[in-house]
Image (spheres, rainbow, N blue to C red):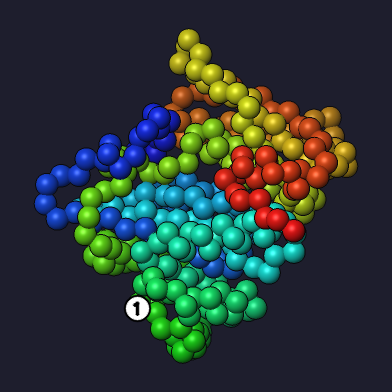
Amino acid sequence: MTNKLPEKPAGAGVEDAVAPSGQTRCGFVAIIGAPNAGKSTLVNALVGAKVSIVSRKVQTTRMPVRGISMSGDSQLVFIDTPGIFAPRRRLDRAMVESAWSGVGDADIVALIVDAARGVDEDVERILGKLKVTNAQLVLLLNKVDRVRDKAELLELASGLNEVVPFERVFMVSALNNSGVEDFRTYLADVVPPGPWHYPEDDISDIPLRLLAAEITRERIYHLLHDELPYSISVETSDWKQLKDGSVRIEQTIYVERDSQKKIVLGKGGSAIKQVSSEARKELQGVIETPVHLFIFVKVREGWGNDPARYQDLGLNFPKD
């Protein structure tokens, strides 16, 4: 498996995935949960490479991201979904709708619950909808290393199973990679028989241009977590392979107000320089080639109500 994410040629898909002779398996596994339950961290750990951005800021993931992992003759396609919560704005509604669409595409639905936080209104809301799903259900209690009294974990798992019957329960710490391999091995054994949907060395179906934008957005949240609302957008506007083998990338960060633009730029451009430096280094590790990254910041008022922006994010535009 490689960490490199090559651009897919037009038309690449199932017909390009050549599996060896013998009994092969392939299944789609939707990872759902409340915001900040650890979904993206878990998917990255399962894949063994970064395919989804991670941030302390809630609702960081905006669209379903597919991470692909091989385990023996089984191909596991993990769908990292946006956190499910009570939506207030149009963008919130689009993200929650997107999360539930990922459930509809899955053979197995894995509910991940922050064991340290327990059951809150968001988890209760998810459990209510899972009662009517036909997919196989699995429960993951994440961040178990933060719970001192392990008896509390058993009590939490038992209470959740009383509401919705889960096929299996796993205790994991995605950040520390604890219990992750047991979960992956289980999935490899239970996903349905069938041909692989992706080439063996693929680890994600997200285009590089979009992944690059997501990495920059992650760096913004990491640096400006307490100062900036999460309603910003990053677009990769240009991607050129240069003669020396390096890549020149241009991106635009869109904010909704001038005050937000000043925060992103920072005093004397200090913040945007740090974001650019950190994003460039991470991108170089992903595509394994030198990167020249140029970032611009623009104000686009009301972008959260612009249907074109939703299309760019891979989201449906909710109607009022």
Across and down, in percent, residue 315 comes to 60, 49
**Which residue extends farthest top?**
243
Residue 78 placement: quadrant: bottom left
Q: Secondary structure at mark 1?
A: loop
> Is 114 placed above or below 92 here?
below
Q: Residue furthest right?
A: 259
In this rendering, is residue 1 above or below 293? below
Q: Residue at x 60, y 23 (%)?
A: 238
Residue shown at 42% from the left, 59% from the top: 105
Q: Quadrant of the N terminus?
A: top left
**Amino acid type shown at disc 1:** Glu
The residue at the point 73 percent across, 43 percent down is 306
Where is residue 170, by image quadrant? bottom left
Badge 1: few (under 14), some or many (20 or more) residues near its Cα, within 10 Å? few
Q: Front-most of 225 and 113?
A: 113
Q: Quadrant of the C terminus?
A: bottom right
Q: Whole-percent x and y of residue 222?
A: 67, 48
- Foreground of the two, 227 or 261: 261
Relative placement, left or right, of 310 versus 144 is: right
Please state the horizontal and vertical placement of residue 61, each as a whole percent of the image: 59, 53
Q: Residue at x 47, y 64 (%)?
A: 103
In the rendered image, which residue does mark 1 sit on? Answer: 167
> Does the image show residue 244?
yes
Q: From where the camera sits, is residue 145 visible?
A: no
In the image, farthest residue toward the front: 319
Residue 286 x, y percent position in the rendering: 46, 35
